[in-house]
Every structure is written in C-alpha cells, then in structure tokens.
Image (spheres, grey):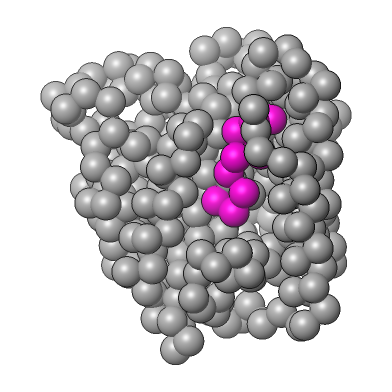
Amino acid sequence: MNSHSMSDPAIAPDALVTAAIARLTGIHAATICPMTAEFRMDERALADHVAAVAGNDGIGGLLINGHAGENFLLTREEKRRVVAICREVLGPGVFLTSGVNAESSLDAALHARDAAEAGADAILLFPPNAWGLFRDRDSALLHHRHAMAGCGLPFLLYQAPVGAGAMPYDPATLAGLVALPRVCGIKEGSWEVATYDANRRLAKGLRPDLAVLGSGDEHLLTSYLIGSEGSQVSLAAVTPAPLVALWRAAQAGDWEQAKHWHDAIYPLACAVYREAPGGRATTRLKACLKILGRLACDAVRPPFAPLPPEEYRRLEKALAHVEKAGAPR
C-alpha cells in the first residue's frame, strides 16, 4: 500500500473501491480477540496475535472484529481499539477489513466511522440479527446505505451460511446490495457449494470486478475450483501455512497439491465448524491457539461457554493431522 491510508479523504471513492478489490486476493486471516480470565480485552495479547498472523508468508491481510473476534460481544470503544491496535502494530502495509455488526443502522454508521478513523481499509458489514425475522429487501439496502454514510471506506457484504436459518440474503436482495457502488466484495460464507456457485455467478454477472471470497473453511478447494478471488477465513489465524499452500496450489492449477492441503485441514475445519454446537467455533479457535502455545488464556466472553475436555482432545488430534501433512514446498 502507498503512504495514503485507504480512508484518506483525498482519494476518490471509486478509486478506493478499485484499490480494495486489488488487495482482496489470496488468504486473509480472520483473527480472534484475546481476553483475560476476567473477560477483559487483552490488548498486549491482541497485538502479539495479529503481528504473528500477519507475519506469515502469503497472508494478504486480516479480517478483524469478525465473528471469530467476538464482535457482537465487544463494546463500541473496544471495537475501535482493536482496529487502532492492529494498525499501530502492523503499520500501513497490511490490509485491514473491520467487521461491523450492529442491530441499529445508526450504530452501524458510527462503528464504521470509528473503524475508518482508527485505520481500517474496508468494512465488512454483517446483517443485523433482526434481518432473520423480517427479511425485507428495502431494509437490507437501507441498513447498508446508513452504514456507508458513516465513512468513505469500501464495503464487503456478508453472505451468511445456508444453515443460519433466514440470515442469508436471497438472490434479489443480494443483487440489490451488489449494485451499491461502494461495495468491493463479498465474504461468501454460504458453506454450501451449490449456493456458493449460484451467488458467485449472480454477483460476477452484475459486477465482474467484484471480489467474491469463498470463505467456507471446509470447502475452500471446491470454491477455488469454481472460482474465487481469495478467502477471509479464521483457520488462517491458526494454521496459516496450509491455507496459503492450498490457495497457491489452486492458483497454479496443481490440483493434486491442492487436494493434499485440503485433506490436511479438513479434519480441523470439521472439528472447529461442523461439530455441534456450531456456536462454539470461536471458543475452539482460541483453544487451538492455546494448544499450539500461541495464546496463554483462551477465555471467551459469556454467553460462550468453556469447552469440555473431550473437545480439547478432538482439536489436538486434528492439529496433529495438519502437522503430519508436512511443510509447504
């Protein structure tokens, strides 16, 4: 990145969108937010975590304040601090996407402004949970327009998993959101291959320039075969090298190597995301980092519950499977 921040008001909005699309390629790691045993945000541990993750070869940027970062459990000031700490530690060269997750569209605009002022390069806007109750296209568009009014940054859409009830955008709503000029990409988390394919075709048909990021950790290989500009995934904050190796092999058309790395990470992806209850994913990610010796305290804020001992054993086994795959060549 040049000396300008992506939020520099001297840069025209269309140029910001184009610049963001160019940076939204490859593997972007979705990071966690470390807590103390008393559930306070551990700023030192956060700085160490993001520095370690961003320092891995092939990591193209970070997604902070996402689901893995416990965004809906952080205060407004804590979310701003996450962005500020990451920018201070990482400098201007690392692309930072900050999640914004708020029930109120007015709050979403404030949080987006906070993120821009603290140094984010783009905003990933999550739908409010109430969207699952009313699913009104005009309200979805209004929510995004209000959030966009809060800052001048490019925005990514979040397409929720098909298993998340009514949360995913239907095709008509997705088409309307893709048409918003400040949209630079989609974190496509449908977690189902046929839906990913359909959504990608819809989005690229309307906006061929758009960065559609296949972000279902269990089926990255299939997403890359169909087509993807990259991924924003939390496994890359735990085992970055195999994720990068999978992406690079797919980009090179070396599908034998891509399959090797898919097989390496698949048990871990299932242990973190597929095993019920699915709401434990963030807790499991922190547990993995603690098992690997990269996180001293794996506390998560309530209502997330601590993991039972058998879950740690399952994660240890899956991490050992990744290790057996060897180092990327």
Quarter of the rendering occupied by the N terminus:
top left
Quadrant position of residue 164:
bottom right
Residue in the picture at 28% in, 40% down? 151
Q: Position of residue 35 (x, y in %)?
A: 45, 76
- Left or right placement of residue 164 versus residue 64 in this view: right
Q: Which of 43 and 58 is in front in this view?
A: 58
Q: Nearer the viewer, residue 222 or 117?
A: 222
Residue in the picture at 30% in, 17% down? 15
Q: Nearer the viewer, residue 298 or 71?
A: 298
Residue in the picture at 38% in, 31% down? 154
- Left or right placement of residue 302 versus residue 267 in this view: left
Residue in the picture at 55% in, 34% down? 27
Specify whether residue 243 is painted magenta. Answer: yes
Q: Nearer the viewer, residue 193 or 272?
A: 272
When the figure is inspected, residue 86 is found, relative to residue 292, above or below; the finding is above
- Residue stretch rendered in magenta on the structure: 237-246
